[in-house]
Amino acid sequence: MGERLIFHVDVNSAFLSWEAVDRLSKGDTLDLRTVPSCVGGDPDKRTSIVSTKSIPAKKYGIVTGEPVATALRKCPELIVVKPNFHLYQKMSHAFKSILNEYTPLMQSFSIDEVFMDMSGMELLHPDPIKLAHEMKDKIRDELGFTVNVGVANNKLCAKMASDFEKPDKVHTLFPDEIKDKMWPLPVGELFGCGQSTAKKLQEMHIKTIGDLALADERFLLSVFGQKTADYLHYAANGIDDSPVVNEEREAKSYSVENTTQDDVTDFDTVNHLLLAEADVVASRLRADEVKAFTITVIYRTSDMKRHSHGRKIENSTDITSEIYDIAVDLMKECWKGEPLRLIGLSASDIDRDGFQQMSLFGEEEKEKQKKLDKALDSIRNKYGNNSVMRAGIGVFRND
DNA sequence: CTCGGCATCCTAT
DNA sequence: CTAACGATAGGATGCCGAG
């Protein structure tokens, strides 16, 4: 196979742009993108953080992930907008639909990012850069928000390129440009090189992506595992063979976690939360017609440390009460009563055969459903009707 | 020694 | 004064005990 042509399309300040477009379309005269603003949680809650910020907000030193309260200290006029995931889904679908007109081989990388395999389109589109401009302009003109497009021979380089100067830009990162455009960047800007890896590399006097590209692989192996060392070496050299795949992968786990308004120290509150969470996880499993073999509880103590404790069970389950019972058990086994700020529940080791088997036994299935309903009812009765409700805490819960 | 299970770490949006 | 701070998911890694 010859050389590929890959695009990475990234919406500029996605959530904020989408809020801005939505408000303008409703007759608002203020464009949020032109003033210090961000999408974030309720500033009065301790858990609220900045999700996406406008470019003017960035100029005040406001960064993604910081508490809204500190952002407001940096810029008291900051406009904080609550997230609206319905809107984002709609906008996401709209821009992906436009891109889909250009190629069937597309991979949704996140709500606002797409990889496109444009290989073999030389006859239809002889100039890839012109094509990239066309796509980005079409999105801007039809939908009202801007994107960056990265053009390269693989996904990694396309992704790195789309991250260059913003907004509303097309950048290329072809093999002969890697030295000039990518190697001078700090290692931490390499996709896949996060805070921890960057820090270790700094300590090894590997400061830029170029330093990393030229580093001895055995040196890397002395600090990182085989896969990480390998990845770092190839990525820094702009090498990536991973294909653009359009099937969305099946979930490998289903999890919920809730950060509480105040630290929790009693089992009663913990159990209520676990029940609400078991209900969320179980119904998501049922919605996808799968079951889970492993249930894990997660908690974060007030010192911000995360802990987890899980167990593999004999028969996979999608039943709220079963998951709840296991979760309570697990929590009893590991939690010594330290104040908790977060409690979560995860179902993994997904079983995709359970439902098929059940449909062979129609009667049994009905029987099971009845039991399930009964179990849920008994729990509801035990704790009152409000207990089987999602915990209403946190900023980014989907509806 | 290898493998499954588990806890934790790391990274991403 | 400092650190403070979400939800969700996938993969890597290291340890431990069983076979």
Image (spheres, coloured by chain):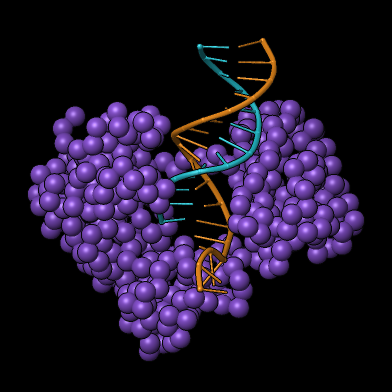
Chain colours: A purple, B cyan, C orange
Q: Residue at x 36, y 68 (%)?
A: A13
| Residue A158 x %, y % | 24, 49
Residue C4 in which image quadrant: bottom right
Q: Is residue A261 visible?
A: yes
| Residue C5 x %, y % | 57, 65
Up/down of A22 relative to A65, above or below: below
Going by the image, does A108 lie left or right of A318? left
Q: How many marks?
A: 0
Taking the view exactly as shown, the residue that stands out farthest to the bottom is A29
Q: Is residue A160 visible?
A: no
Residue A389 in which image quadrant: bottom right
Which image quarter holds the C terminus of chain A? bottom right
Q: Nearer the viewer, residue A317 or A335?
A: A335
Going by the image, does A332 lie left or right of C6? right
Q: Residue at x 13, y 46 (%)?
A: A179
| Residue A154 x %, y % | 24, 42
Up/down of A154 relative to A1, above or below: below
Q: Residue at x 85, y 47 (%)?
A: A375
